[in-house]
Amino acid sequence: ASGTPLPKVRPVSEQEMFRVMSSGKRKKKAWKRMLTKVTYVSPTFTRKPPKYERFIRPTGLRFDKANVTHPELKATFQLEILGVKKNPNGSLYTGLGVITKGTIIEVNVSELGLVTPRGKVVWGKYAQVTNVPENEGCINAVLLV
């Protein structure tokens, strides 16, 4: 991640990322975790039954669009997120789709009309998140060209 707009990212602790949820009849079991950060959940995702769900991703913290700035065009577009490529805090957060500052996300750039040298339309491109989404309620990112 040396050629990215944000090469260094503050590490996020597990206490900050998750809230421990108690479950069971007398609330003695404490193996559930609720995420406190913004996440991306694919549209085809189906939840497990709540009893067996280990990581809960609250609906209010799920985002499907990002404000992406094109560094050469100096213009910003609201693009759909296709997935989380890499979260710098670890593979657990990448798999859960957690979006923090510095995360590399894949965005749908088909409406920008970018084409390859061969003339094919580009679908997905990577962008790096530049803001702290859970504080601002939106995702701002810079396209990696």
Image (cartoon, rainbow, N blue to C red):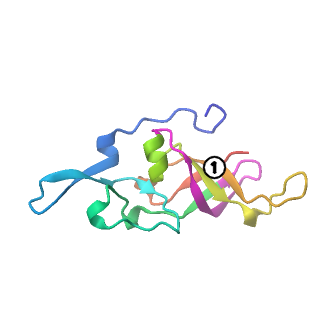
- The rendered magenta stretch, by its main secondary structure, is classed as strand
- Residue 17, how many percent across, how many down? 35, 46
Using residue 134 as the reference point, say whether residue 123 is left or right of it.
right
Image quadrant occupied by the N terminus:
top right
Residue 60 screen position, x and y as percent? 39, 66
Q: Quadrant of residue 122?
A: bottom right
Asked whether the viewer can see residue 100, the reply is no
Q: Position of residue 32 (x, y in %)?
A: 26, 54
Does residue 111 appear to the left or right of 8 in the view shown? right
Point out the stretch of residues depicted in magenta.
69-90
Identify the residue shown where x is 76% and y is 48%: 72
Residue 84 magenta: yes
State the residue lying farthest toward the left.
26
Residue 31 visible to an observer of this rendering: yes
Q: Is residue 145 left or right of residue 141?
A: right
Of residues 70 and 38, the one nearer the viewer is 38
x 12%, y 53%: residue: 28
Task: Report whether 95 appears left or right of 29.
Answer: right
Vertical side of 16 occupied by 125: above or below? below
- Residue denoted by label 1: 127
User: Residue 90: x and y, percent?
Assistant: 46, 39
User: Is residue 20 highlighted in magenta?
Assistant: no
Q: Residue at x 16, y 53 (%)?
A: 29
Disc 1 on helix, strand or loop? Answer: strand
Q: Is residue 13 placed above or below 41 in the rendered structure?
A: above
Q: Quadrant of the C terminus?
A: top right
- Characterize the local packing of mark 1: few (<14), some (14-19) or many (20 or more) Cα atoms within 10 angstroms: many
Q: Up-down: is 136 above or below 46?
A: above
Q: Nearer the viewer, residue 13 or 134?
A: 13
